[in-house]
Amino acid sequence: MIRLLLTDVDGTLIGTGSVIHPRVLEAISKANASELHLAICTGRPSFSRASQYATLVSPNEPHIFQNGAHVATLFGRTIQSSVLNVAAYRALVAVSRRVGVTLEVYTETRCLVEQHSAIAEAHQELIGMRAQHTDLFSVTEPVLRVQWVNTRREQPRLEAEMQRISQIQYSSAGTPDMPEALFTSVTQTGTSKLEGAAALARFYGVALSEVMMVGDGDNDIEVLQGVGLGVAMGNASAGAVAAAQHRVRHVDEGGLADAIELALETRAVNA
């Protein structure tokens, strides 16, 4: 029986033009009338437009933000958070300065940048936030996560640089609205969407085997493999498809609705 359903945002909940398919809206309403718990599981921060999606999916319950670095409600209750190692953080800032690629720095409440670029500004506009400009070495509050906003051409060099830095892990994702861009999220080793899923499962008192994850990107692979039922979207990457046990339709065809219906069916069978 599925008792908790987690959904990625970009390419899963929202499709081209940041549109949520009407079938998905209907399925969410149906799920919320049942005892199935819903939550978003995203790389986006809670202070971006992700808060609107979280409110739509489940307004009063916790969600997984920042690729698992921040598990919290929209009302300020933190279930779990993790902080990036200071030495690793400073090394990443140094790489950003050396290679000239924008590095977004995320705390629980704001995004900070040192460099501006057209692709980074387009990303901020897309997710509904505005980064603050500052000297990144001057940041004193805990940093949960950093993120490269880069072109696909820049990715190999960034990965080579990150492989020299200890105590970090990274994953990349994209969005249908910016097909030329990659968003490479960097967190402390051990911080991931899967760990966020485990924290949320503990919060609800359910087993990971009773959790469904619906996703489309390579940054969803670990959690798709680690929960009870991993579901890949029709538009998912090859890695996400291989990691999942089930596949639904494309995001622009409302594939998430199929996954929600599947979760509800498991509950009906076991009722």
Image (cartoon, grey):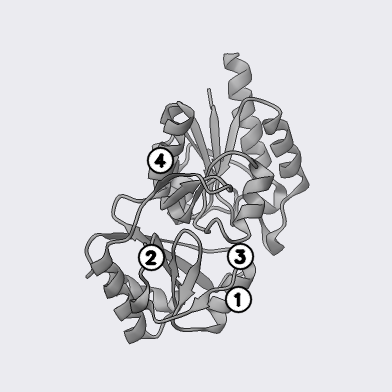
Tell me the number on the disc at residue 225: 4
The tag earlier along the polypeptide, 1 or 2, is 1
| Amino acid type indicated by mark 2 | Glu
Pick whichever, 89 or 181, lies toward us: 89
User: Is 146 situated above or below 242?
Assistant: below
- Give the number of the mark in front: 1 or 2: 2
| Amino acid type indicated by mark 4 | Gln
Which residue appears at 62% of the width and 25% of the height?
A: 35
Which residue appears at 53% of the width and 74% of the height?
A: 131
Q: Specify few, some or many for label 4: CA neighbours under 10 Å numbering under 14, 14-19, or 20 or more.
A: some
Residue that carries the numbered disc 1 in the rendered image? 122
Q: Position of residue 253 (x, y in %)?
A: 71, 49
Which residue appears at 70% of the width and 53% of the height?
A: 252
Residue 13 seen from this side: no
Q: CA distance from mark 1 to mark 3?
A: 9 Å
Horizontal arrangement in the rendering, residue 196 relative to residue 40 (left or right): left
Horizontal arrangement in the rendering, residue 257 relative to residue 211 (left or right): right
Cβ atoms at labels 1 and 2 below 8 Å apart: no
User: Is 99 situated above or below 267?
Assistant: below
Which type of secondary structure does the marked residue at label 3 adopt?
helix
Which type of secondary structure does the marked residue at label 2 adopt?
loop
Cβ atoms at labels 1 and 3 below 8 Å apart: no
The tag earlier along the polypeptide, 2 or 3, is 3
Residue that carries the numbered disc 3 in the rendered image? 127
- Give the number of the mark in front: 4 or 2: 2
Cβ atoms at labels 4 and 1 below 8 Å apart: no
Residue that carries the numbered disc 2 in the rendered image? 141
